[in-house]
Image (spheres, rainbow, N blue to C red):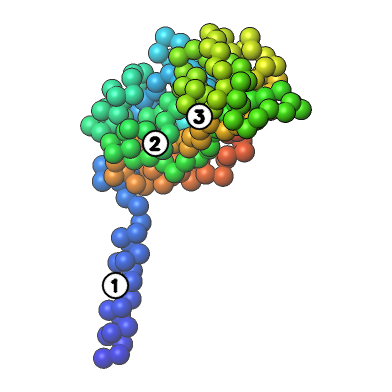
Amino acid sequence: MRAAVCIALAVVAVAACACRIPEDPDGTLDRVEGGVMRVGITESDPWVELEGGVPTGGVEVRLVRRFARDLGARIEWVDGSEEELVDALKEGSLDLVIGGLTSKSRWKKDAAFTRPYVETTTVVGVPAGSSLPDDLDGVTVAAELGTEAEALVDAKTDADVRPVRDLGRAHGEPAAAHDYVLDDLGLAAGTELKEDKHVMAARLGENAFLVRLERFLLGRSEEIERMLRKEGRP
């Protein structure tokens, strides 16, 4: 009797473990390995750079190319708007969507996001050694015209915003920018305005593919930060 109970418990344990193994209902990982990975892309510097709908660079483009090599897969790139790509992902026409998505994206209910693989911040960069008030009261801060950074400076500080079309021309003066372009502007990080956690989007339910992608991405944050500093431009 005791032996029968032990066997029954062992069977239940094995079944429970099996249930925890990620699976793809539509077999995405099995199909992609040694096959074709369909990747939706939308332009978002420095994550995805396009020319005529063809990726020419970008941090996420480089990462996906490496991931595809690990899988022995050929990439089929599909250019479109975020909405078009997420709709295609939901219908199973795409396996992955990239383009600077963050964990707070409005698409988080329509796609399976990877765990955040790198964090970036929007900050007010200041000349090294300068002493500015924490609230930046009366300080003139350059910000690219029509961007989120311009709005953040206005909403979160008492600075006087100076909208510019080319942030690169504001070299050496206080400016609102992503942390990875501060070196190019000759600035050091000052007041933080916003933090973003970056993700990639896979099809809902295709968990084996998602886990494989996450394993590839996690642990590469320092490498990705170096790529951002290299590819990011003000």
In terms of sequence position, does the residue under pointer 1 or pointer 3 come before the other?
1
| Residue 227 showing in the rendered view | no
Mark 3 highlights which residue? Answer: 156
Residue under the point 41% across and 41% down? 114
Amino acid tagged 2: Lys
Which of 26 and 72 lies nearest the eye of the viewer?
Answer: 26
Q: In whole angstroms, how far apart are the C-alphas of marks 3 and 2? A: 19 Å
Q: In this view, does 76 lie to the left or right of 170?
A: left
Which of the image's four quarters has the N terminus? bottom left
Q: Residue furthest bottom?
A: 1
In terms of sequence position, does the residue under pointer 1 or pointer 2 come before the other?
1
Which of 92 and 188 lies nearest the eye of the viewer?
Answer: 188
Amino acid tagged 3: Lys
Provide the secondary structure element on which disc 2 rests. Answer: loop
Percent coordinates x, y for residue 171 in the rendering:
67, 14
Position above or below: 77 against 18: above
Q: In whole angstroms, how far apart are the C-alphas of marks 1 and 3? A: 55 Å
Which of 58 and 109 lies nearest the eye of the viewer?
Answer: 109
Q: Is residue 229 left or right of residue 97?
A: right
